[in-house]
Image: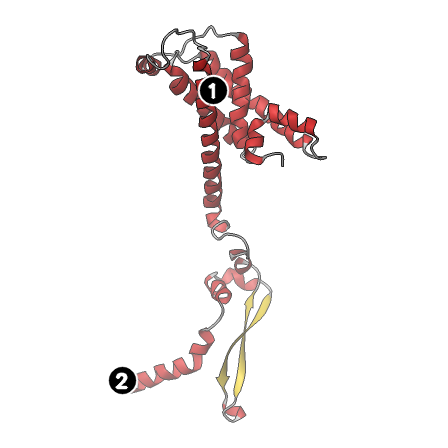
Amino acid sequence: MKNVCRGFLVFLFLFAPCLQTDSRADDFAAGGPEDRSGELQEHSFSRLPSASDGGGARTATASAPATGTLAAAYVPGEPRGLSGDDEGDGRETSNFRRLVRAEKLSLAAQILGMGVLQAADAWNSGHRPFSDARDNLRRAWTSAPVWDGDSYFYNYIGHPYTGSFTYNLMRSQDASPAVSWLFSCSQSLVWEFVLEATEQQPSIQDLIITSNVGSLMGEGIHRLTRRLKKNGLSWKKKAVILILNPAHVLNNGFR
C-alpha cells in the first residue's frame, strides 16, 4: 500500500504540471484523432526539475494543432453555440426573434386598421362596434368562408398591399421568401378569422389573394427597395420606399 501511495505521489510530482495547459489545448485533446493533422503550435508548460542541471529547471514543450476542430470551436467576438451541431439552434433563435418583432408590428397595424374601419363604419352595420362579435365569430369558425361583395379597390388593391406589408415584415429582416410567405399567410388568417370575423364572414377571395398575390408583390418591392438603396437615397427614393415598403422602414429605417 505504501508503494502504491509513493508511486501516486511521484506521478503527481512529475506529470501534474503537464496537465496545466490552456483551455484551447484541452479542447483539441477532446476533439479526437481527426484533429491531429493540423498545423502545430507550441505551448509552454510548467518547468520540470532535471537532475542533469543540478536541481535547475528545464522547459517542457508540447505541440497541438491550431487548425481543425480547435480553430472552428470558438471564434473570438462571436457568440458560442452558433457553429457545428448548434448552428441550427442559432438560426432558430434568430428566426424566432424576427417572428416576434414581425408579429408585434403586424398585430399593431391590424388593430389600428380595424379601429379605422370601425370608425368609418366600413361594414355598414349601423350598430355599435363589436356588439355582435360573439355570434359573428361563432359563425365564422363553424361555417365555410363566402365570396364577398366588397369593392374592387378593397379586395384587389387593399388586400394585396396588406399581404405585401406582412410579407416584408419578415423579408426585410433577411428571412427567406418561403418563411415570409408563411408569415403573410398566418396574418391573413388572423385578420379573416379573428379581427374582421367580428363583423363579417371570412372571404374566399381575401384568403386567396392577400397572402399569395401580396407575397409576389412584396418580393418585387423588396428587390426594388434594395436596388434603390444601392447608390444612396434621395428624398424621392425615401418617399417611394416609405409608400411601397413601410415594413422595411419600420424594421431598418432608411438604412
Residue for badge 1: 113
Quick check: 105 left or right of 144? Answer: right
Is residue 224 among the parts visible in the rendering?
no
Number of marks in picture: 2
- Say the numbered circle drawn on residue 1: 2
| Vertical relation: 188 (above or below) 25 | above
Task: Decide: is 230 above or below 26.
Answer: above
Q: Residue at x 44, y 27 (%)?
A: 107
- The residue sitting at 48% across, 71% down in the picture is 21
Q: Quadrant of residue 100?
A: top left
Q: Residue at x 54, y 81 (%)?
A: 59
Indicate the quadrant where residue 203 lies.
Answer: top left
Comparing labels 2 and 1, the label whose residue is closer to the camera: 1
Q: Earlier in the sequence, mark 2 or mark 1?
A: 2
Label 2, secondary structure: give it. loop
Disc 2 residue type? Met
Residue 24 in the image, given as x and y percentages of width and height: 51, 64
Residue 226 x %, y %: 65, 32
Dot 1 crowding, Cα within 10 Å, few <14, some 14–19, many 20+: few
Q: Amino acid at mark 1?
A: Gly
User: Could you tell me which secondary element the residue under label 1 belongs to?
Assistant: helix
